[in-house]
Image (tube, rainbow, N blue to C red):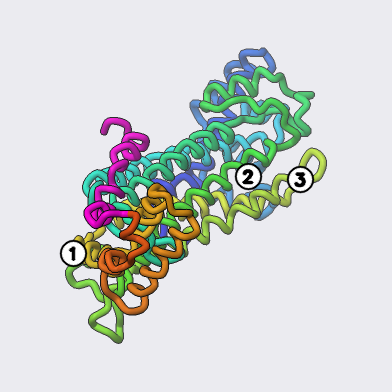
Amino acid sequence: MIPRYARPAMTKIWEPDNRFRIWFEIEAHACDAQAKLGVIPATAAKALWQRGQWNIERIDEIEKETKHDVIAFLTNLAEYVGPEARFVHQGMTSSDVLDTCLSMQLVQAADILLADIDALLAALKRRALEHKMTVAVGRSHGIHAEPVTLGLKFAGFYAEFARNRKRLVAAREDIATCAISGAVGTFANIDPFVETYVAEKMGLAPEPVSTQVIPRDRHAHYFAVLGVIASSIERLATEIRHLQRSEVREVEEYFSPGQKGSSAMPHKRNPVLSENLTGLARMVRSCVIPAMENVALWHERDISHSSVERFIGPDATITLDFALDRATSVVEKLVIYPEAVARNLNLMGGLAFSQAVLLALTQAGVSREDSYVYVQRNAMKVWNDGGQLLDRLKEDKDVTAKIPLKDLAALFDMGYHTKHIDTIFSRVFGNA
């Protein structure tokens, strides 16, 4: 992952030192368990904890010869531990270390991502409550529909990311498994107690049935959830991009002093952060299909998944971490233009109230088909020639024959569309 889109805490999870530290802990806890079983001397387990070290450059040097990263690590470890190192990795296979380590790394990554989502949720909630009753025009197909509020938009995104948080918690639980079961998962050369012991020490759960590897449906689930979260980020970014268009300009990304929008046009203030989020979301989603394809390994294991995961593990988590943090910043600093919101709400001469009139006519005894005709013919006059829908309706004898003028005007009350906003907010935020 390029540094431009990486944050230090998430990056460190995928650095060699963290990986080798986890490898060491797996091996050391396994030795403790083996010592408890009497398979290896307790002094050997103690020696590993006391003298166990590693040197990344030395491991790389050894791997050039062995062409095997775990053997290179164990060889380097033995150089520090001494003769007792012969008891390390008893009955284990490389995937016991690699898969359990990957589980730990994905759990660590999930914890950071959950904190990221919490920060974004806090920002969305604050903006939702701030603009709870800032009435704006809703749009379907990009065309004016009926009034909503800006707060309701933020509340909708809050609810979506709250669902994403639950999904990530479930994915974290699913991936938090440990496999210390030997060459084909049968425990032929290692007691199941070792797996249970290591799992408890690492904060993981024993894998119920492993082959040589932890089943990759777990990983597919994890990366699929990351893809869904990325899609939600893109939906948020797309909404901001549309609302920032010059013709709309209801919201705008914060434009800092000294910031430049274009090398050619000094007037430009572009939604570059939201556009960037759209691109980052695409990159995270690009990791989902490879994770799905990793599920179907040959027999007890092949290596086709390994290279894939060396890419998508760091790439997806580092990119999503950055994107969530950027999305939070965009929401927190988002500039709202209430005057433009009000202007756009009234831009179409009250057409947003057409359904209220339609329903009132049906309640007054007019068929739905005729009601639609009455309202639409007046709405099209406003659409084509301008003016106000209410004025057009007042001149329509078919309409006024069924709805008195005072009642007709009441149908254009904005409160008609906001009367249940409190109910929606209570569903999303409780009593907040």
The residue that label 2 is drawn on is 220
Front of the two marks 1 and 3: 1
First of labels 1, 3 by sequence position: 3
Q: Rounded to the nearest whole Å, what is the CA distance between mark 2 and mark 3?
A: 13 Å
Looking at the image, can residue 252 be seen? no
Indicate yes or no whether the magenta region holds residue 426: yes
Residue 173, quarter of picture: top right
The amino acid beneath tag 2 is Ala
- Say if mark 1 contacts mark 3, CB within 8 Å: no
Residue at 31 percent of width and 49 percent of height: 417
Looking at the image, can residue 350 be seen? yes
Rendering coords of residue 130 (x, y %): 21, 47
> Quick one: quadrant of the C terminus?
top left
Q: Is residue 206 left or right of residue 161?
A: right
The amino acid beneath tag 1 is Glu
- Say if mark 2 contacts mark 1, CB within 8 Å: no
The amino acid beneath tag 3 is Leu
Figure check: 5 above or below 198: below
Decide which of 242, 182 is in the foreground and name it. Answer: 242
Local packing at callout 1 (Cα closer than 10 Å; few below 14, some 14-19, many 20+) is: few
Q: Which mark is residue 297?
A: 3
Decide which of 281, 349 is in the foreground and name it. Answer: 349
Q: Is residue 5 left or right of residue 69?
A: left
Q: Which residues are magenta?
A: 403-432
Local packing at callout 2 (Cα closer than 10 Å; few below 14, some 14-19, many 20+) is: many
Decide which of 263, 408 is in the foreground and name it. Answer: 408
Rendering coords of residue 322 (x, y %): 40, 54
